[in-house]
């Protein structure tokens, strides 16, 4: 008979198939934690927005990993801002679509302005990630790099020329 861990009442936990005390991660680990930043729940009928925002998050994380090989805290914060602005724009579009007939012309214009502002701020945060830069041959890297000629003073010997 397989020894299964028990709960406080002494009964075996249902669905447990490992070795007691040896299965699973150590207590307190953070293996499954990506960045710890969380957003609030959206109103009823807006689940599609949450799905679109989560898809955008995965695309941003994939692009960063391909470009930089890691996601640092600054990049994670920029991704969080991207997602908040995208969510804001999608919610404004949703409410404009649902309530347009009840809104005045100036209110509809404000919703439209909020959508455009959200898009602009989202794009600004995407640009801050630096994904559009070619990392292969940056002119700044070439300018500030210490080349062979500089290290060797142009003579290839590595020292100062005698005159």
Image: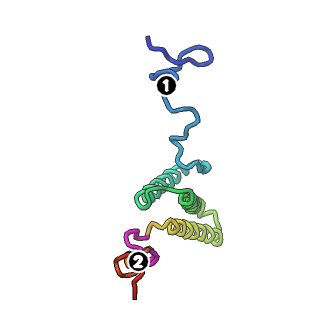
Where does residue 22 sit, x and y in percent of width and height?
49, 25
Above or below, 110 against 37 in this view is: below
Range covered by the magenta-colored residues: 133-145
Q: Residue 81 occupies which quadrant of the picture?
A: bottom right
Where does residue 73 sit, x and y in percent of width and height?
56, 56
Which label number is shown at residue 159?
A: 2
Q: Residue at x 56, y 17 (%)?
A: 6
Of residues 141 and 123, the one nearer the viewer is 141
Give the structural element (helix, strand or loop) at label 1. Answer: loop
Q: Quadrant of the C terminus?
A: bottom left
Which label number is shown at residue 22?
A: 1
User: Could you tell me if residue 97 is visible in this image?
Assistant: no
Give the structural element (helix, strand or loop) at label 2. Answer: loop
Q: Residues within 10 Å of mark 1 (few under 14, many from 20)?
A: few
Direction from residue 139 to residue 53 in the image, left or right? right
Where does residue 3 sit, x and y in percent of width and height?
48, 14
Q: Residue 158 occupies which quadrant of the picture?
A: bottom left
C-alpha gap between disc 1 and disc 2 = 62 Å
Quick check: is 134 in the magenta stretch? yes
């Amino acid at each position: 008979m397989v020894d299964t861990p028990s709960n406080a009442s002494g009964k075996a936990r249902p669905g447990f198939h490992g070795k007691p005390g040896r299965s699973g991660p150590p207590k307190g680990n953070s293996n499954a934690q990506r960045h710890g930043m969380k957003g609030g729940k959206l109103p009823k009928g807006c689940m599609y927005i949450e799905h679109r925002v989560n898809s955008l998050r995965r695309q941003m994380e994939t692009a960063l990993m391909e470009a930089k090989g890691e996601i640092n805290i600054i990049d994670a914060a920029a991704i969080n801002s991207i997602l908040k602005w995208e969510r804001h724009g999608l919610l404004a579009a949703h409410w404009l679509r649902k309530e347009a007939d009840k809104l005045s012309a100036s209110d509809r214009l404000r919703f439209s302005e909020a959508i455009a502002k959200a898009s602009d701020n989202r794009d600004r945060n995407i640009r801050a990630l630096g994904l559009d830069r070619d990392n292969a041959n940056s002119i700044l890297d070439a300018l500030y790099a210490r080349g062979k000629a500089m290290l060797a003073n142009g003579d290839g010997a590595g020292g100062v020329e005698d005159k």
